[in-house]
Amino acid sequence: MKLLNPFKREKTFSHGGIHPLEHKSSTADRPIRRLGFAPRLAVPLAQHKGPPARPVVKVGQEVVRGEPIAVADGHLSVSMHAPATGRVAAIELWPSAAGPKESAIVIDVYQAASQEVLFDHPVDVLELSPQAIVEAVKDAGLVGLGGGVFPSHVKLVPPEGRRIETLIVNGCECEPYLTCDHRVMLEQTEALLRGIRIVLRATGAARAVIGIEDNKPDAIAHLRSALRADDAIGVQAVETKYPQGAERMLIESLTGRQVPGGGLPADLGVAVYNVGTLAQMGELLPQGRGLIERVVTVSGPGAEHPGNYLVPIGTPVSFILRQLGATGYVTEVVLGGPMMGMSIASLDVPVTKGVSGVIIYRAKDEEQGRQRVYPCIKCSRCVEACPMHLNPSLLAQLAHKREYERMASDHALDQCFECGCCAYVCPSNIPLTQYFRIAKAINRERPALVS
C-alpha cells in the first residue's frame, strides 16, 4: 500500500478498527462507464430513512426520464423521479434487499427512446436563499449515497440552538472492493466542489474539510490541485483503517473530538456528507433535476467485468449480472460492501439510491464460504476492535439468551452501527453483527420495552 508520507502517521480515530484486505485494485483505475437500461425498472418508494414517498403517477401513465413520480411525504421523506422514459406498468410490492417486499413504481422502459433527461428547470443555485436550497435538495430526492440514505436536506438545517461551523466531506471509502467514490473524486471533481459550496452557503459553515484515506494518493493530489489558494475547502489525508468512513470515526479523526453518546454531529458544529452525495448535489441542483442514477462498483471474485458503472435507479441485479457476466456459479450477491452490505435473497432486488456496490461471490470462494461457529473463548479481540468502545461479547451473550431488553437498557446497542469489526476478528466465527441486527429489529417492534 502506498502512503503519501511513509514517515508520517496520518490522522485517525482513537480506539479499535481493523485492516481487512482491500480488494480494490481490479476497479480503482477503471473509469466510470454507463450501464444500459433494463427493459423494466422498479423504483422503491422507501429508499431513505423516513416515510416512503407518495406516488403521483397512475398505472398506464407515460413518464419521461427525470419526471417526478413520487413526492416527499413528510419532513424526513424525499421525492422520486423516473429513471427512464417509459410507461408505469404497476405500483406494487417488489423484492427488497432487507427481505420483506416493499412498494415500488414499476416502469416498462421504451427501448427505442433516446433516454434524454426531458424534465428540468435550470437555476442559479448560489443565488438561492438557504431555505430555497433546502427545498431544492429535498425535491431532487437526494439522500446519503454512502449507504446511510439519510435525507440530505435534513442535515442542512441543524437542531434549534445548534450551528454548523464545519462541513466534513467523506471521501474515505473504507469498505473493501468499493471504488465508486474514488472515481467520483477523480472524474466528477467540478460537481463535487460545486456541491460543497452549495452546502457551505445553505448552512453558513465557514469551512469544509475533505477526508480521504491515504490509500488514494491520486485523489488527494487531484483535489488539492483543483482548489483555489483562498478556498474555504481543504483536503486532509487520514489513515487507511476500517471503519474510517463511519461518520463518528471521521469526525474524531479530523477534529479530535467525539460525538457524545446519544448526540448528533451538529452538537459539535459539524455536518458530514459523502462525496457521491455532494457530487450529485452539484450536478443536479443547477439543472433543476432529480436523482435518477448513481455510480456503483461491480466487483468481487465472481465478477467477470468488474468496474464502476453509472446505473439507473431501479435496475434489477439480475440485469447487471446478465450485462456484465459472472464467473462460475454465483452463490451470493451483496449490495454495498462486504462489511456492512446486505446479502440479497432475490436477483429481482433493484439498485436503490443507497447501493454503492454489487459484490458477486461464487462457489468455493474462501472468503465467502460458511464456517462453523464455536463457543466464545473470551479472547477480547472483539472488544479491542470495536471503535465504539462496546463489549460485543457481552452483548452477544445477552442476544443468545434473548435478553433483548437488557441489551437496550444502557443504550449500548444504540451506539453499535453494525460495522462488522467484531465479527471479522472473532476466532470462533460468531456472527456478532447479525445478533445485534436481530436484537435491534426485535426492540423496534417492542418499543414499550425500551426505555
Image: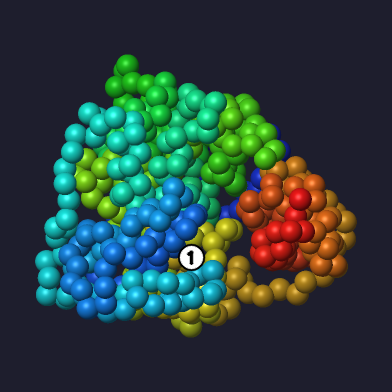
Where residue 122 sits in the image (x, y, percent)?
16, 43
Q: Is residue 85 visible?
A: yes
Who is closer to the viewer here, 170 or 412? 412
Q: Is 73 above or below relative to 334? A: above
Who is closer to the viewer here, 143 or 231? 143
Q: Residue at x 24, y 34 (%)?
A: 125
- Residue farthest along the right direction in this orientation: 378
Instruction: Assign a secondary structure to mark 1.
Output: strand
* Quarter of image, res 423: bottom right
**Residue topped by disc 1:** 335
Q: Is 284 above or below relative to 221? A: below
* Quarter of image, res 299: bottom left
Q: Residue at x 53, y 75 (%)?
A: 100
Task: Indicate how the structure is coloured in the image.
Answer: rainbow
Which residue type carries mark 1?
Leu
Q: Is residue 195 visible?
A: no
Where residue 183 sits in the image (x, y, percent)?
35, 48
Q: How many marks?
A: 1
Q: Is 233 above or below relative to 58? A: above
Q: Is 338 above or below relative to 87? A: above
Q: Residue at x 64, y 55 (%)?
A: 418
Q: Residues within 10 Å of mark 1 (few under 14, many from 20)?
A: many
Where residue 440 sits in the image (x, y, percent)?
68, 60
Q: Residue at x 54, y 44 (%)?
A: 245
- Residue farthest along the bottom direction in this orientation: 329
**Horizontal side of residue 28 vs 225, given as left or right:** right
* Quarter of image, res 303: bottom left
Where residue 434 sits in the image (x, y, percent)?
68, 65
